[in-house]
Amino acid sequence: MNRQETSSSYQELSEDVEHADANLEPAEEQVDKEDLDDASSTILPILDSNSPSVRFSKSCLKNVFSVILLFIYLLLMAVAVFLVYQTIADFRDKLKHPVMSVSYKEVPSYDPPGIALYPGKAELLTCKHHLHNYIPPLVNPGQPGEIECTTQRINYTDPFANGTKKFAVIVEGPRDVKQQELVFMQFYLNETDQDFSAIDYLLFSSFQDFLESPNKPDFMKTCESSYSSWKFSSGFRTWVKMSLVKTKEEDGRETVEFRQEISVVNYIERRAKASGDQLFFVVFEWKDPFIQEVQDIVTANAWNMIAILCGIFLALFKAADFAKLSVKWMIKIRKRHLQRRTQALNHIS
């Protein structure tokens, strides 16, 4: 009886030990899993690409790149502002300093100019029109000959010397430039008390305007005030080749100027008795059939300047918009980085 009770109690004790061992094994396995989880949690953040340190380096590079871009666009904006200033300055400078434009107009014939001669005591002996640039040999030089030119004699008051009277012989100039028409004149001066003898002359634009003028003395005074005068000397044949220059002023007025090429040939005296008297020979001819037209042209184009300014201002607005977006993006990245850093610190703690 006693043996039976002892065996039953021993059997119950062994069952309790086995039940305790079975409960202990799962607990140990749970502890081992927790240790492994802790170990993995301490090692994985170093190797993970989404760790806070890796994210920080990427965001730092992005911020540096954004700052560089921002400085580049600020530099471009400064260049655009300089271009705006330079464009406006160039436009104003071109308005103040127009460019001279020269063109040539070919004409078959000219309006005959007026040739005003101031012979003084000299006498006009001959005046003839010749063609094809040819002058026949002189016949009886120093003697009165034919005057085939249209001439007018006039007295008027010198515009530069009050009260001084001037005597002028107005001669119609050559017309036909294609056939090389010229005007040949010969003057004779018997005696002179001067060391040098010369005859003054001036050219004005239209002989017809002189004929149609109601007040010819005033017309000549105006011409003498507007045109330059020249001289030709005795003892020579002075050949004057004329060219016409028309200049258009800014206010719309048109001025006429004569340019001359003068060649001088010595006269060979063959007269037996030629002591004391002087002979003058002068030829007037057109140089070429081209009238030179000069006018000032403003090269500044307002539409071109407006187009350039519109392009520059558009670039400025685009650059400013990009800079604003870049700054907002940098602020957003900074805030996101601070939030992730705070979350990482909270996780570690």
Image (cartoon, helix red, strand yellow):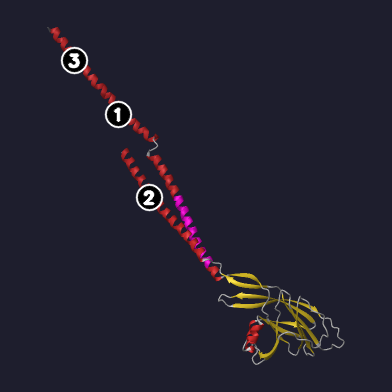
Magenta segment boundaries in residue numbering: 67-91
* Residue 174 placement, left or right of 90: right
Was residue 86 drawn as part of the magenta stretch in this picture? yes
The disc labelled 1 sits on which kind of residue?
Answer: Glu
Q: Is residue 52 above or below residue 326?
A: above
The disc labelled 3 sits on which kind of residue?
Answer: Leu
Instruction: State the predominant SS element of the stretch in magenta.
Output: helix
Identified at 60% across, 70% down, the residue is 100
Q: Which quadrant does the N terminus fall into?
A: top left
State the residue position of label 3.
13
* Residue 101 placement, left or right of 23: right
- Tell me if mark 3 has few (under 14), some (14-19) or many (20+) residues whose alpha carbon lies within 10 angstroms of its own: few
**Residue 189: x, y in percent?**
78, 88
Identified at 25% across, 22% down, the residue is 24
Identified at 15% across, 10% down, the residue is 6
Lower sequence index among marks 3 and 1: 3
- Regarding mark 1 in the picture, which secondary structure is present there? helix
Q: Which quadrant does the C terminus fall into?
A: top left
Q: Is residue 87 above or below residue 200?
A: above
Give how far apart the Cα atoms at labels 3 and 1 are: 32 Å
State the residue position of label 2.
331
* Residue 288 placement, left or right of 33: right
Is residue 12 visible to the viewer in this orientation of the structure?
A: yes
Residue occupying the far right of the picture: 272
Lower sequence index among marks 2 and 1: 1
Nearest the eye: 54 or 145 = 145
